[in-house]
Image (spheres, grey):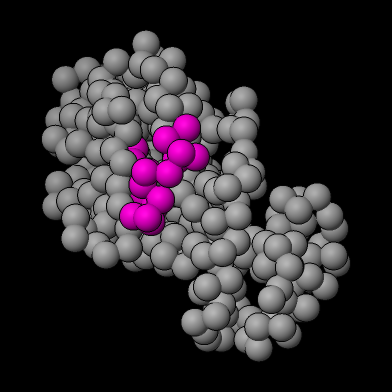
Amino acid sequence: MVTEEQLEALDLLIWLGNGKLAGERQYCNQSSVSRRISSCLEILGVSLDRRNGQYLLSESKDYLLLELELHQLLRLRAGARLRLEATHCVSYLLTQPPLPGWILGSFDHRSVDRMYELLRERVIDVWITSDTFDLPAADDPDLGVIQLSHWPAWVLADAHHPLCRESGLSNGDLDRFPVLAFPQTIYPVMAGALAAIGFGASHTRLARYDRGSWNSHTADEVTLSFGGSVSAHGSPGQVMLQWDLGLVSGEALVLRRDLLSHLQVAMLVEQLRQRFQRLQPHCQDMTLLV
């Protein structure tokens, strides 16, 4: 059996995709993380591959899945070092103050499918998504959902965008500017819903949905994007244009079904409810669901 420290190092690298970040979460240097991972891989009899910027195990063995389940139960029993990933839209709600008992991710991810894979394999414990279009199916055997909020989607722009100074916007006004579109490889259903609206001079599709790329594209003061009042409040340089997309999204917790009623999850939901409540005066079109 591998040690908790060794398996955690491996999990953190697979989750965060970066040895330096994994070391920060384990309060050690990158060399220590590498040694722990090497020992873990040797004991488990598997290897680690890197494809498209992601670390993947060469194979998934039954005893490895049992190890992951055992270590998740230990985290839950201790109420410590639980693993929470989230979209960047709500990252500002999670860091100040820190959530007791939880390790936070990098708030960047490659796809909904990747997040669900990490949840199924118990590499992470909870994911907060701001995309309610691509939630797991109601009959998904492994994953369940706790809805946190709903809000209408708006067109977002840099605070210095020319349209911020105009009223009575039309499709023609929006068609003058490029739109930063959600890639179908990341948010397939949401991407389709937004593409069906069909406005914008051109569509820039990112290979990865991360804070740096997203903010740097809209900071050109020309490109438009999509979002809601929650994400706009967390990005002071962005404003909502008065153009209702006719779409509703929101935040939701996605986790394994066998954790839905766990005490640690109930405590997390209550902490999030309080934080969303404090946000409501600034996001009056948000509906709190918990």
Left/right placement of residue 10 relative to residue 76 reads: right
Q: Is residue 1 above or below residue 128?
A: below
Q: Residue furthest top?
A: 281
Left/right placement of residue 244 relative to residue 178 reads: left
Residue 240: x and y, percent?
33, 25
Locate residue 100: give its quadrant.
Answer: top right
Quarter of the picture containing the C terminus is top left
Q: Is residue 7 above or below residue 283?
A: below
Residue 200 belongs to magenta span: no
Q: Residue at x 55, y 48 (%)?
A: 76
Residue 77: x and y, percent?
58, 47
Q: What stretch of residues is rendered in magenta?
A: 251-267
Residue 71: x and y, percent?
60, 61
Nearer to me, 85 or 263? 263
Q: Residue furthest front?
A: 77
Nearer to me, 68 or 248? 68
